[in-house]
Image (cartoon, rainbow, N blue to C red):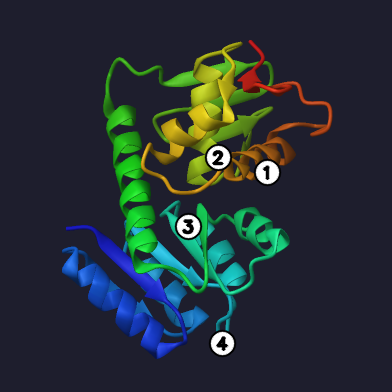
Amino acid sequence: MAKILIVDDEKMIVKGLRFALIQEQYEVDCAYDGEEAVEYARKTEYDAVLLDLMLPKLDGMQVCQQIREFSNMPILMLTAKGEDMDKILGFEYGADDYITKPFNIVEVKARIKAIIRRNNQAKVIVKEPEQTQKVVSGSLSLDCESRRVFIEGKEVNVTAKEFDLLELLASNPNKVYSRENLLNIVWGYEYPGDVRTVDVHIRRLREKIEKNPSDPKYVYTKWGVGYYFKG
């Protein structure tokens, strides 16, 4: 049974989400402030965390950042603010996805199912003995088994989705993937988000692995088509 953590200080929202997710046979924990959320996350490896942006004690960004120090559990940021900057900031601090309030509970359940399915598929792929365990290109090295990235031997902290994108591109050098293909492969065919999600993750990935993100040496843009890894 998949485990979900809901983090929101609005008790009616938590109550509604909890009821809907229990109906889907999820095991659900609830936290009402940022500090409580981090405590829950330290004790349990959740299949997904629904994390509100505006929280007492620690805000959603701080919670996300702290969780990323010890876990890559999928985090879906809940935000009442629809501005693109808020969404980008959410990804910057390690969120895997965002949902804007007021949200449709059907959409929330679809996002959770998609992110859990993709996460489970990634775990299965890593366990296959045929899978290439390491990908090395110049000073960049990927350990596919431990899902870690190194630049010149120094580990770079990436989110689960950033690693999925980099692993896919680096394992298929010079193959151009459209943003739609990347969205379908990495986030899942039933993912209801849009291709801007890919652009945000690519931008964040470049900032972490490229010396000069505006003049990349690893992840290139094929204008009008998509992205590829320079082999």
- How busy is the neighbourhood of tag 3: few (under 14 within 10 Å), some, or many (20 plus)? few
Q: State the residue in front, 126 or 26.
A: 26
Amino acid of disc 2 = Glu
Q: Looking at the image, tell me whether mark 4 or mark 2 is earlier in sequence order.
A: 4
Q: State the residue in front, 172 or 69.
A: 172
Residue at the (39%, 89%) spot, across then down? 11
Residue hosting label 4: 56
- How busy is the neighbourhood of tag 4: few (under 14 within 10 Å), some, or many (20 plus)? few
Give the side of residue 224 with respect to residue 127, left or right.
right
* Residue 74 x, y percent position in the rendering: 42, 54
Task: Give the quadrant of residue 71.
Answer: bottom left
Amino acid of disc 4 = Pro
| In contact (CB < 8 Å): disc 2 and disc 1 | yes
Question: Closer to the camera: disc 3 or disc 2?
Answer: 2
Separation of residues labelled 3 and 4 (CA atoms): 22 Å
- How busy is the neighbourhood of tag 1: few (under 14 within 10 Å), some, or many (20 plus)? many
Q: Which mark is residue 162?
A: 2
Q: State the residue in front, 118 or 217.
A: 118
Residue at the (67%, 55%) spot, across then down? 88
* Residue 37 x, y percent position in the rendering: 44, 76
Q: Which mark is residue 204?
A: 1
Separation of residues labelled 3 and 2 (CA atoms): 16 Å
Q: State the residue in front, 89 or 34.
A: 89
Residue at the (62%, 58%) spot, across then down? 93
